[in-house]
Image (tube, rainbow, N blue to C red):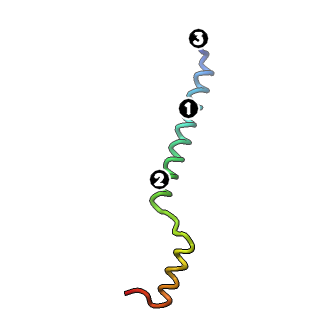
Amino acid sequence: MAEDKSTQKGRDATAEGLRRDIDENLKRVFEASLDPEIPDRFKDLLAQLKARGGTR
């Protein structure tokens, strides 16, 4: 059974959209892994150490 051209174009557009979504999500995860967020409790501890003159 022959597929009509509009059906094939629709599939191609859907596949392209999926590829774009996957690429964007992979980039987002990769960038997040490069710049991890420091938990607030560690920031507070660092601030306390600096206030005490804890750097040697």
Q: Are marks 1 and 3 in contact (CB under 8 Å)?
A: no
The residue identified by callout 2 is 30
Q: Quadrant of the C terminus?
A: bottom left
* Amino acid type, residue under disc 2 in the picture: Phe
Percent position of residue 39, x then y: 54, 69
Label 1 CA crowd tier, 10 Å (few <14, some 14–19, many 20+): few
Disc number for residue 24: none
Image point (55%, 79%), residue name: 44
Whether 8 is drawn above or below 36: the answer is above
* Amino acid type, residue under disc 3 in the picture: Ala
Q: Residue furthest left?
A: 56
Image point (50%, 57%), residue name: 32
* Amino acid type, residue under disc 1 in the picture: Ala
Percent position of residue 36, x then y: 49, 63
Image point (49%, 50%), residue name: 27
Q: CA distance from mark 1 to mark 3?
A: 20 Å
The residue identified by callout 3 is 2
The residue identified by callout 1 is 15
Whether 8 is drawn above or below 54: the answer is above
